[in-house]
Image (cartoon, rainbow, N blue to C red):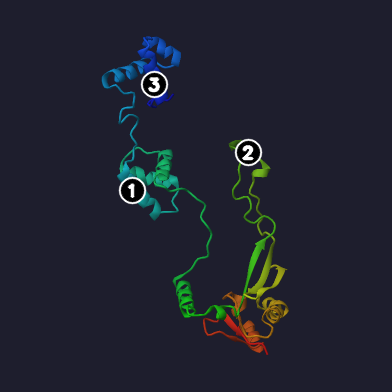
């Protein structure tokens, strides 16, 4: 039992019971595998107060009090990307106390904080946020029936070799050089581009191709997959074709093709196109 650790209540009760039966303190210590001083102190407290509870204030005091923890939490939430070592260096200077990395790590957990791997999200500038706000505000009063006329589309790239697999691995300290615990990576991982569309009427076509996409390839995708999906899903009814502002989507040849196919620009940002079936 570590130094300063309180004796369990059940063990204290056994000591008192043996004492009340007339067993000597030395024999009690031998039976319960405790030091004579520990048994003596528990019996003395029982004589003085008639209780076997632990005295208040026993044990080592924490280095950082509640006020220090509040300051630490403010610093961590302000500097979310700081390492524990950097936070420790700041805390040593700020609190003027000898603090270790382990102490700060425990203190961070006491602040109800925890270290996580940050999620990856696309960067949004003020202009991006403003445009999204205006787009959402202008479409706020659209009815459900209006939204059902939208043909949604998007494309995404998927790495098919290694990608981000193996970022985290469960292993022992000795398994760091085990090949099954490596994070495998290549300089240019093979990837596939996937384009798809859907609406409230159902799912449209899904197209897969290798490599990157440019305006010419994107027009081919629209001709071979978007137009048939539009005819199948809307059966000649007017619809609104949605796409984002990726470069192949906003290229001049793409815009010209949309006009030729009677896919007139929607009035909002050119990110949404209105389709009228002839």
Q: Compared with residue 131, is residue 122 higher up or lower down, i.e. above or below?
A: above
Classify mark 3: helix, strand or loop. Answer: helix
Q: Which mark is residue 101?
A: none
| Category of crowding for the residue at label 1, using alpha-carbon neighbours closer than 10 angstroms: few (below 14), some (14–19), many (at least 20) | few
- The residue to which callout 2 is attached is 175
Residue 7, located in which quarter of the rendered image? top left
Q: Evaluate if marks 2 and 3 touch, with contact meaning CB atoms under 8 Å apart.
A: no
Q: Is residue 39 left or right of residue 274?
A: left
Task: Please identify the residue farthest to the left as the structure is shown.
Answer: 48
Q: CA distance from mark 2 to mark 3?
A: 47 Å
Residue 222, located in which quarter of the rendered image? bottom right
Give the percent coordinates (x, y) of residue 184.
Answer: 66, 50
Classify mark 1: helix, strand or loop. Answer: helix
User: Which mark lies nearer to you, 2 or 1?
Assistant: 1
User: Which mark lies nearer to you, 3 or 1?
Assistant: 3
Q: Is residue 220 left or right of residue 26?
A: right
Q: Earlier in the sequence, mark 3 or mark 1?
A: 3
- The residue to which callout 3 is attached is 13
- The residue to which callout 1 is attached is 70
Q: Which residue lies at the image location 66% right of the left edge and 81% below the top edge?
A: 234
Give the percent coordinates (x, y) of residue 182.
Answer: 64, 46
């Amino acid at each position: 039992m570590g130094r300063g650790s309180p004796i369990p209540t059940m063990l204290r009760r056994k000591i008192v019971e043996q004492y009340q039966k007339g067993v000597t303190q030395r024999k009690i210590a031998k039976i319960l595998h405790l030091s004579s001083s520990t048994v003596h102190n528990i019996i003395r407290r029982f004589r003085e107060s008639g209780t076997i509870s632990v005295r208040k204030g026993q044990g080592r005091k924490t280095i950082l009090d509640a006020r220090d923890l509040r300051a630490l939490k403010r610093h961590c939430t302000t500097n979310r990307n700081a390492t524990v070592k950097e936070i420790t260096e700041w805390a040593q200077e700020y609190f003027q106390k000898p603090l270790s990395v382990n102490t700060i790590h425990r203190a961070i957990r006491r602040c109800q904080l925890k270290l996580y791997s940050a999620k990856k999200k696309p960067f949004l500038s003020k202009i991006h946020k403003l445009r999204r706000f205006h787009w959402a505000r202008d479409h706020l009063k659209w009815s459900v029936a209006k939204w059902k006329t939208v043909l949604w589309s998007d494309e995404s790239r998927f790495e098919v070799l290694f990608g981000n697999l193996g970022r985290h691995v469960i292993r022992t300290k000795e398994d760091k050089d085990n090949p099954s615990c490596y994070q495998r990576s290549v300089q240019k991982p093979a990837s596939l581009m996937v384009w798809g569309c859907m609406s409230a009427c159902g799912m449209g076509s899904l197209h897969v191709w290798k490599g990157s996409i440019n305006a010419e390839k994107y027009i081919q995708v629209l001709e071979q997959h978007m137009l048939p999906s539009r005819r199948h899903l809307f059966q000649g009814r007017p619809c609104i074709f949605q796409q984002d502002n990726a470069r192949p989507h906003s290229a001049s040849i793409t815009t010209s093709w949309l006009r030729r196919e009677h896919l007139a620009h929607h009035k909002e940002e050119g990110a949404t196109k209105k389709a009228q079936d002839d």
